[in-house]
Image (spheres, rainbow, N blue to C red):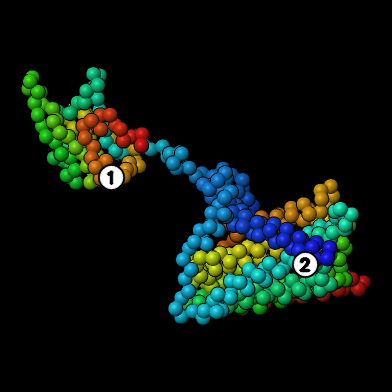
């Protein structure tokens, strides 16, 4: 009867002197998996331009209908998005838009704690998707 | 006059240090339990979370103080006071150190030296349980009543074994005065002569102060905190303080009775006393992180059918050995 009690005490004492496995969250972060689906960003080409051709596949495949695109054409007849907006509040982070994109324009990053104070701050426009101003918040 | 000033200063100093210890007991407990569970424990308020007890105290003060409609109001208010006051009374007879000479004036490092110190200790320790019982009863809550009922039953069961476990020490020392008991241990600690009594004392003391693995009266999982379920704000904090004060006192008494009190080489006596008490307190937290709670009938079975005969046998064996 006594031996198991002492065994238990020994075990907990070993745990007491071991290093805590807690991740001190705001200062430290958990490493995410390589295929983690965090908040979106726009992939840029070697000229620093985003690759989106406003085909609308991402908006079509989006199950929560959170992507809005207005397509336009430049003088060479190349399609580009005049307006592009992801509503990050409605997004369910399924990653279908990334799968659907034929030109690898949209990707998902590793940021999993995208928070802000106002609803407008969750509307990701082209500028924000390219500059990724929300990533370092 | 000088005696009065000396007494008042001693009471204030001891009270201040003791309350500080009690406040930081909460932090120590949370830290040690955290480390046992491979996490950090509180570390956000101040360096290493050192301001946590102060933050908790301020929070407790500003919480809303609720008294349930069907509570017995005077007793409801009185109960936490009984718990904490009786716990504070206990430190009056514990000798912290030998006499020191200050400004040509001999000062004994104890508040008072009662000839019936142990009797006083057990009397006030029992009064502390009244706070728990009355608090649970006056809440007008069924869980509170169940907790209070369990506290009463457990207290009666383990008080016997607790008292019997120290009788061996009293027989060896031939005195009920705690300072005489300490002085008798100058050459050898009582724990060497009474090892089983020491173990029985610690087990019974844990049961007496309703601590894991005997924390039936406030079993979180089944009674939702038991006797203190309806208490909030500073009243709850008082119960908490009383509980930790009891824990510190129980360990201090164990130090005095079994581990030679302030006796020890090289270091000053007060430091020895604090170190020994701290080791016992650490053990109490450590075992809380280790052992699961006993079932109610197991506690009763353990108290009456195992501990009581064993402590009685210890007394008989001690008597036989001393007579030979």
Q: Quadrant of residue B279?
A: bottom right
Q: Quadrant of the C terminus of chain A?
A: top left
- Looking at this rendering, what residue extends furthest in the right direction? B324
Residue B271 visible in the snapshot:
yes
Picture quadrant where residue A76 is located: top left
User: For residue B324, what is the image quadrant?
Assistant: bottom right
Left or right, A35 with respect to B190, comes to left
Task: Pinpoint the chain carrying mark 1.
Answer: A
Q: Residue at x 51, y 47 (%)?
A: B44
Q: Are marks 2 and 1 on the same chain?
A: no
Q: Is residue B211 visible?
A: no
Q: Residues within 10 Å of mark 2 (few under 14, many from 20)?
A: many
Q: Left or right: B142 with respect to B266?
A: left
Question: In the structure shown, which secondary structural element does the residue marked by tag 1 occupy?
Answer: loop
Along the line of sight, the residue nearer the viewer: B28 or B200: B28
Which residue bears the numbered disc 2?
B93
Picture coordinates of residue B254 (x, y %)? 75, 63
Q: Position of residue B222 (x, y in %)?
A: 49, 70
Give the x, y percent position of residue B197: 77, 67
The reply to whether discs 2 and 1 touch (Cβ–Cβ < 8 Å) is no
| Label annotation for residue A110 | none
| Residue underneath mark 1 | A118
Q: Is residue A103 above or below residue B193?
A: above
Please name the residue shown 54% across and 76% down the image.
B76
The quarter in which the N terminus of chain A is drawn is bottom right
């Amino acid at each position: 009867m006594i031996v198991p009690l002492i065994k238990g005490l020994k075990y907990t004492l070993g745990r007491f002197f071991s290093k805590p496995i807690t991740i001190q969250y705001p200062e430290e972060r958990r490493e995410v998996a390589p295929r983690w689906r965090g908040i979106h960003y726009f992939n840029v080409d070697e000229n620093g331009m985003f690759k989106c051709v406003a085909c609308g596949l991402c908006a079509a495949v989006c199950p929560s209908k959170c992507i809005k695109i207005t397509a336009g054409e430049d003088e060479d007849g190349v399609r580009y998005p005049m307006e592009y907006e992801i509503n990050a509040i409605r997004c369910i982070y399924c990653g279908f838009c990334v799968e659907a994109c034929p030109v690898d324009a949209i990707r998902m990053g590793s940021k999993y704690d995208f928070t802000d104070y106002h609803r407008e701050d969750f509307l990701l426009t082209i500028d924000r998707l390219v500059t990724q101003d929300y990533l370092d918040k | 006059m000088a005696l009065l000033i000396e007494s008042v200063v001693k009471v204030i100093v001891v009270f201040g240090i003791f309350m500080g210890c009690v406040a930081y007991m909460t932090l120590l407990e949370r830290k040690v339990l955290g480390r046992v569970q491979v996490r950090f424990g509180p570390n956000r308020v101040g360096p290493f979370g050192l301001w946590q007890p102060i933050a908790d105290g301020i929070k407790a003060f500003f919480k809303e103080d609720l008294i349930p409609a069907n509570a017995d109001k005077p007793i409801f208010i009185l109960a936490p006071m009984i718990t904490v006051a009786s716990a504070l009374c206990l430190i009056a007879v514990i000798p912290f150190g030998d006499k020191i000479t200050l400004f040509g004036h001999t000062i004994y490092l104890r508040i008072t030296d009662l000839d019936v110190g142990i009797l006083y200790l057990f009397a006030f320790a029992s009064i502390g349980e009244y706070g728990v019982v009355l608090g649970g009863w006056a809440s007008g809550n069924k869980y509170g009543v169940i907790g209070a009922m369990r506290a009463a039953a457990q207290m009666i069961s383990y008080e016997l074994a607790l008292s019997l476990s120290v009788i061996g020490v009293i027989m060896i020392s031939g005195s009920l005065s705690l300072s005489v008991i300490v002085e008798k241990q100058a050459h050898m600690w009582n724990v060497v002569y009474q090892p089983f009594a020491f173990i029985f004392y610690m087990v019974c003391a844990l049961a007496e102060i309703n601590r894991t693995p005997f924390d039936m009266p406030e079993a979180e999982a089944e009674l939702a905190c038991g006797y203190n379920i309806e208490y909030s704000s500073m009243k709850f904090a008082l119960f908490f303080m009383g509980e930790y004060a009891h824990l510190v006192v129980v360990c201090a008494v164990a130090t005095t009775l079994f581990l030679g009190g302030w006796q020890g080489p090289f270091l000053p006596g007060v430091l020895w006393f604090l170190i020994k008490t701290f080791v016992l307190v650490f053990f109490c937290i450590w075992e809380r992180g280790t052992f699961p709670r006993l079932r109610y009938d197991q506690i009763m079975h353990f108290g009456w059918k195992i501990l009581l005969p064993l402590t009685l046998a210890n007394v008989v064996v001690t008597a036989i050995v001393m007579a030979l």
